[in-house]
């Protein structure tokens, strides 16, 4: 949530800041702004809405200076207006902020008592005002910013720029990520390395509680106790090619299409050379020593966990608790002995998931994470971090990260079954060979796109849509409904098919399309019975199934989408594709902003 960037360079900062913000826009797009120091003068430009509005403003009202900070906002405190847009300036200091200052009300009172007045409704303005007060009391910029930091509660990544200082940025992180980029005689700071990718691949990540003083030629990092800290400089490999749309109209379309490739790469990564076993990176995990799993995540990643519960329980015989991170973290659940805790997160920075992980540290028999960003906080704080290798995901609605999460979780469940002796070697090899064939099956599913787009154009007229699924298709129904609502803004809800008659069936009439996800598997007949109950009440069923399912249960359905048949265990990954395409094309038909849907941000670093 919110992206921040800073540059101390050798060229005009404004275009560099805007370019970097473009790469951070996935973190929020309610407003954008930059501040620079030129001839000692601190000045700023801000615009409401997407970054393009700031770019337009800068064409008419340019901002000079080679030192600057920038921000793209996902509004927390205060409406998305120019006044509330970052950078916030108070006298000689400008600040950009990602996170929430939880004690800002108390600080506001204190600042007001000191005779300062507020112009914004934000929590961040307090940070700028406090720093101004300390500077006016005689402290230098860095000392004033440090004193301000010591007063702040909550989660933040902050960057400060000061009047009269065109070779200084002060930055700090607590709860929100921050990366420092090293150039040749230039220094950068950004919410993530992607923002800095065109500028440098030499990155130092700040640790929790760190603060940093940047000049063009030096970097001084101090830890939470104020002691000098040595943080490693890493060469980051960011695949530039994967950060553009690659000829697709939207990042989401590109990311949907990439799935056969990235899933294939993830499978190869975890397969032994002979393809007969699943191999984990060090220190590994022996499921024979684990009696129980607790899985925690948010949103789409949570639905990946719900799917994995079925796999771990059915295939490996391990009981699994699955929780939404924002509930788990405050419920203080007991963690029984020999329980491993598993956290799933694309960004690896989701505040609630990170807090849930920290709750489990010292209690669980191991902290495992399944992440897309290997340098993320969640990965770094885990005993074992398993990358999903999806590549950078820019579309706000998660697609390839979801199916890569599923792939890694399935391989983990198969390893668990083998470790616990409930899956013979030969059976494991069979399953893994079906998995290796999956990318080809996914390519066939993607060929249904035109057909799915036609159905989606009709779904776009609906006000409400229901998704139904049983067994492994139930979590996928939840994910399908989430995808649809987040990008098309159509109200969608998902139910376990068998649950419908316990209440939700009252919603059914001829205006409500019902998407039924039902491969011809062991539960198919039961799904068909539930579908009949819906059709008997004039429900309009869109059945997503395979050829056998269409033949045996398709009669009376409004529309049928036929997918290739596959090992039932793999159906969540396969059926995710039509669910994503359905959401994508419904959104296209409605003309919504697919990659940057309203009110959302990709990396949720606030509670
Ligand atoms: C939905 C979506 C979100 C995320 C959720 C968790 O398409 O992307 O629901 O899945 O915010 O984010 P991560 O996986 O980064 O922890």
Image (cartoon, grey):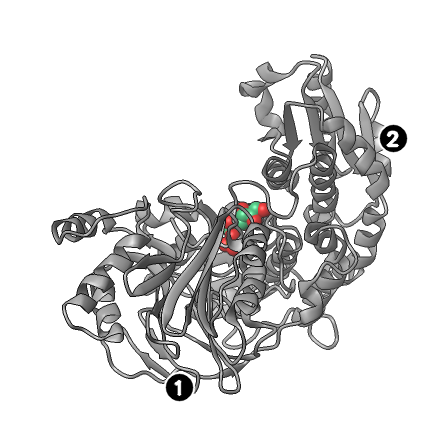
Is 98 situated left or right of 50 in this image?
left
* Residue found 84% across the figure and 29% down from its top: 552
Disc number lying in front (2 or 1): 1
Q: Label 1 belongs to which residue? A: 218
Q: Secondary structure at mark 2?
A: helix
* Front residue (pair 30, 416): 30
Image location (x, y in percent) of residue 112: 16, 49
Image location (x, y in percent) of residue 350: 45, 55
Marks 2 and 1, Cα distance to the nearest angstrom?
A: 69 Å
Regarding residue 190, the answer to whether it shows in the image is yes
Image location (x, y in percent) of residue 529: 71, 23
* Front residue (pair 23, 423): 23
Q: Is residue 539 above or below residue 396?
A: above
Tell me if mark 2 has few (under 14), some (14-19) or many (20+) residues whose alpha carbon lies within 10 angstroms of its own.
Answer: few
Looking at this view, name the residue that lies furthest to the left: 113
Badge 2 or badge 1: first in the primary sequence: 1
Is 240 situated left or right of 342 in this image?
right
Kindly identify which numbered label has been placed on residue 551: 2
* Residue found 80% across the figure and 23% down from its top: 557
Is 167 situated left or right of 441 in this image?
left
Instruction: Answer with the quarter of the image where residue 177 lies.
Output: bottom left
* Front residue (pair 415, 495): 495
Task: Say how many tags the image has.
Answer: 2
């Amino acid at each position: 949530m919110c992206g921040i960037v800073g540059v101390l360079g050798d060229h005009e900062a404004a275009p560099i800041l805007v370019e970097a913000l473009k790469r951070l826009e996935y973190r929020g797009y309610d407003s954008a702004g930059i501040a620079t120091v030129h001839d000692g003068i601190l000045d700023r430009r801000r615009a409401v809405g997407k970054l393009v509005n700031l770019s337009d403003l800068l064409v008419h009202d340019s901002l000079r200076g080679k030192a600057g900070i920038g921000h793209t906002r996902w509004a927390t405190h205060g409406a998305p207006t120019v006044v509330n847009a970052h950078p916030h300036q108070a006298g000689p200091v400008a600040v950009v902020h990602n996170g929430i200052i939880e004690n800002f009300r108390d600080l506001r009172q204190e600042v007001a008592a000191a005779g300062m007045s507020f112009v914004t409704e934000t929590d961040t303005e307090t940070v700028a005002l406090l720093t101004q007060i300390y500077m006016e009391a005689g402290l230098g910029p860095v000392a004033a910013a440090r004193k301000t930091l010591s007063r702040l509660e909550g989660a933040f990544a902050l960057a400060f720029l000061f009047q009269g200082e065109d070779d200084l940025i002060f930055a700090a992180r607590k709860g929100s990520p921050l990366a420092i980029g090293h150039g040749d005689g230039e220094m950068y700071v950004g919410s993530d390395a992607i923002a800095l990718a065109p500028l440098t691949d030499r990155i130092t990540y700040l640790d929790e509680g760190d603060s940093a003083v940047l000049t063009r030629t030096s970097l001084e990092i101090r830890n939470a106790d104020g002691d000098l800290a040595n943080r490693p400089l890493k060469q980051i490999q960011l695949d530039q090619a994967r950060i553009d749309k690659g000829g697709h109209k939207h990042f989401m379309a590109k990311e949907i299409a990439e799935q056969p490739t990235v899933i294939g790469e993830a499978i190869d990564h975890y397969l032994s050379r002979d393809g007969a076993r699943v191999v984990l990176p060090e220190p590994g995990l022996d499921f024979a020593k684990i009696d129980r799993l607790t899985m925690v995540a948010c949103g789409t990643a949570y639905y990946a966990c719900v799917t994995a519960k079925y796999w771990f329980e059915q295939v490996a015989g391990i009981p699994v608790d699955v929780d939404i991170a924002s509930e788990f973290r405050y419920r203080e659940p007991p963690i029984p002995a020999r329980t491993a805790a598993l956290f799933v997160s694309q960004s690896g920075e989701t505040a609630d998931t990170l807090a849930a992980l920290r709750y489990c540290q010292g209690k669980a028999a191991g902290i495992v994470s399944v992440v897309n960003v290997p340098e993320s906080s969640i990965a770094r704080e885990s005993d074992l971090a398993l990358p999903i290798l999806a590549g950078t995901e820019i579309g706000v609605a998660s697609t390839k990260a979801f199916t890569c999460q599923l792939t890694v979780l399935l391989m983990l469940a198969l390893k668990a079954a083998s470790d616990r002796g409930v899956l013979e070697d030969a059976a494991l090899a069979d399953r893994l060979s079906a998995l290796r064939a999956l990318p080809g099956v996914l390519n066939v599913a993607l060929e249904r796109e035109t057909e799915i787009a036609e159905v989606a154009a009709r779904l776009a007229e609906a006000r409400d849509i229901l998704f139904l699924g049983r067994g492994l298709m139930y979590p996928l129904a939840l994910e399908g409904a989430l995808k649809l609502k987040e990008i098309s803004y159509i109200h969608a809800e998902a139910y376990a098919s068998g649950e419908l008659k316990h209440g939700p069936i009252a919603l059914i009439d001829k205006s409500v399309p019902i998407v039924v996800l039902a491969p011809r598997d062991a539960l198919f007949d039961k799904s068909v019975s539930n579908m009949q109950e819906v059709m008997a009440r004039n429900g309009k069923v869109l059945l997503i199934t395979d050829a056998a399912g269409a033949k045996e249960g398709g009669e009376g359905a409004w529309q049928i989408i036929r997918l290739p048949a596959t090992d039932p265990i793999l159906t969540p990954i396969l059926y995710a594709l039509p669910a994503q395409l359905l959401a994508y094309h419904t959104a296209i038909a409605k003309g919504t902003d697919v990659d940057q849907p309203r009110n959302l941000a990709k990396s949720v670093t606030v509670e």
